[in-house]
Amino acid sequence: MLEGMNTTPADASAAANGARPGPGDGPVPAIRATNLVKRYRSVTAVDGVSIDIRQGEVVAFLGPNGAGKTTTIDMLLGLSHPDEGSVELFGVSPRAAIARGLVSAVMQTGGLLKDLTIRDTMTLTASLFVSTIDVDEALRRAGILELANRKVAKCSGGEQQRLRFAMALLSDPGLLVLDEPTTGMDVEGRHSFWNAIHADAARGRTVLFATHYLEEADQYADRIILIRRGRIVADGSSAQIKAMAAGRTVEAVLVDADQARILALPGVESVEVRGDRLIARTTQSDDLARYLLTSTDASDVTITSQNLEQAFLQLTGDGDDRGAGARGDDDIRSDDAGRDARAARGLAREEA
Amino acid sequence: MTTTTANRLDRIDASTRTAPPMGGFSPAFLGIELKRSFSNSGLIIFTLIFPIAMLFTIALPNQKYPATDVPLDQGGLTAGVSIMISMAVYAAMVSSTMIGVSVATERSQGWSRQLRLTPLNPAVYIGVKVVTGLAIGAVGVIATLVVGTVIGIQAPLGNLIGAGLVAWVSSLMLTALGLAVGYAFPAQNAMRYLGPILPILSFMGGLFVPLQLLPDALQTAAKFTPLWGIADMAQKLVVGATPDAWSFVNFVVWFAVFAVLAALMFRRDTKRV
């Protein structure tokens, strides 16, 4: 279990303090997953993941391929059993929540019988639940009502994905889980798919979607959980994650750089020395450049802006961990890399 | 199935919703399974076309031979009657095996996994497969016997009902075998393994060739194969003879073996999904 991970988000209404909500405490969390671990032989695919999601949140589960997103989602849905840890959806087991129609999921691929028509698939699915919305209504919301009599085998990938979405809508679930729902769709398809999801979320449906598209997470989620190599590396609002990404990289040739001193400068997030090159990430590049040029022997100073993509890669990439940390604000929960960065900053502050 | 009102979805209390009774079984689910089976051309070929074609090509030419010691001119039944019931057994068993083994395709298409995201209890899914196998088996048996009777391959109604019921019940055993193979192997392999096994078992059971024509050693060995019991019961009952005492034992033992195998493979699979 990582220390930084369960710190209470700044938003005080989050039921993330570990206390079980009582009657007056607001609704039970849509997802409460505690310390999930899943191993496949020697590989630990998911390594201590805890997720609390309040009802009504739209959360992106962001990470590169192979980060453990699908493995985590399988455990959240009860499709596989965690080796350690536990999952509750709306306060009950995943199986019980699914049987009551509280939770639906749109999986990445498969899950459809090719020889059935869209309508038969929907009728069959609807017949398994105690209570559902109208089949045509679900098809209309997913935008495939006019295709109802088409065989699944004749549907395009995007149409099949809309069918999965329509199936997921049938039980009018409180929680909708989408595993990389737009993989293989073109830009326009992605856009209209997300519009359908958003139009549908107006009544407060909780949505958790896994994605490796950064823009998707940024555009459609209230909150982003970043996962890398089976661990959560950051968890915060899109704005917070964006702030992390807003920094710039300042590089300079500087022999014997005082790393601690530079780290203590306002806005500096990380410092790295490669030979005689100094590479620093900062949100206040002007200040750092001014310092380097006026107070040190630095030469050949360059400033490059850090885009979202780079921040994402830095947070989730398999490369070196230095600089991969969150900033000082504890709203963003971060892993050991972030902790190291903070520790280094703390050290630097003491010296300053 | 009722339509829910537009309540807020972010104030959910799990106790306000209920799970369906009977593990999610619904007539609509069974109906769509039946519809799928009856629109599966491969299944229809083995259930209807193959056995009826055999009636014309094999059973009719054998109408001139007696099936028992009683000569035809003294009211003895024809060898065509034995062939007809053998074909009815074959129709029921091939179609029910195909229903059982279809779980392999459904697993590979991710459908079983999708169903895990619904209230459907996996045991109910199996139950629907068994009932579908019984339904399509019944169609195969009835169609074969009715067409045979119409074209002149005749036996007393009581004999046909008794032997027909045996042929029909055999579909339970073969659905179990199909399920076991369907859960044990991936889709592309499942039918490949069963494809050659079914004709061999049918041959050893005496469905294709009367066992008396085989060497003694083979005849003895045949009594331990899975289809011998069913074939013996059906073929004896249809001509009004008493089945071998061991044929029922053979059926029960093999049915138990396949059912246990199916249950084991199913449990292994649900753990893995």
Image (tube, rainbow, N blue to C red):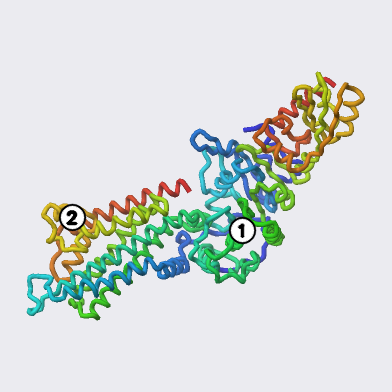
Q: Is residue A46 above or below residue B73?
A: above
* Element type where label 1 sits in the image: loop
* Element type where label 2 sits in the image: helix
| Residue nearest the observer in this picture, B151 or B29 | B151
Packing grade of label 1 (10 A; few <14, some 14-19, many >=20) is: many
The chain carrying label 2 is: B
Q: Quadrant of residue A192?
A: bottom right
Q: Which residue is mark 1?
A: A173
Farthest right residue? A294
Q: Is residue A77 left or right of residue B102?
A: right
| Residue nearest the observer in this picture, B229 or A213 | A213
Q: Residue at x 87, y 30 (%)?
A: A288
Farthest top residue? A256
Res. A223 visible in picture: yes
Packing grade of label 2 (10 A; few <14, some 14-19, many >=20) is: many
Q: Is residue A21 above or below residue B226?
A: above
Q: Is residue A69 left or right of residue B194?
A: right
Query: Which corner quadrant holds the N terminus of chain B?
Result: bottom right
- Residue A187 horizontal/vertical position (percent): 69, 56
Share a chain, discs 1 and 2?
A: no
Q: Nearer the viewer, mark 1 or mark 2?
A: 2
Q: How many marks?
A: 2
Q: Which residue is mark 2?
A: B222
Q: Is residue A335 above or below residue B270?
A: above
Res. B8 visible in picture: no
What's the amino acid at mark 2? Ala
- Residue A224 horizontal/vertical position (percent): 70, 45
Q: Are marks 1 and 2 in contact (CB under 8 Å)?
A: no
Mark 1–mark 2 distance (CA, rounded to whole Å): 56 Å
- Residue A22 horizontal/vertical position (percent): 66, 47
The chain carrying label 1 is: A
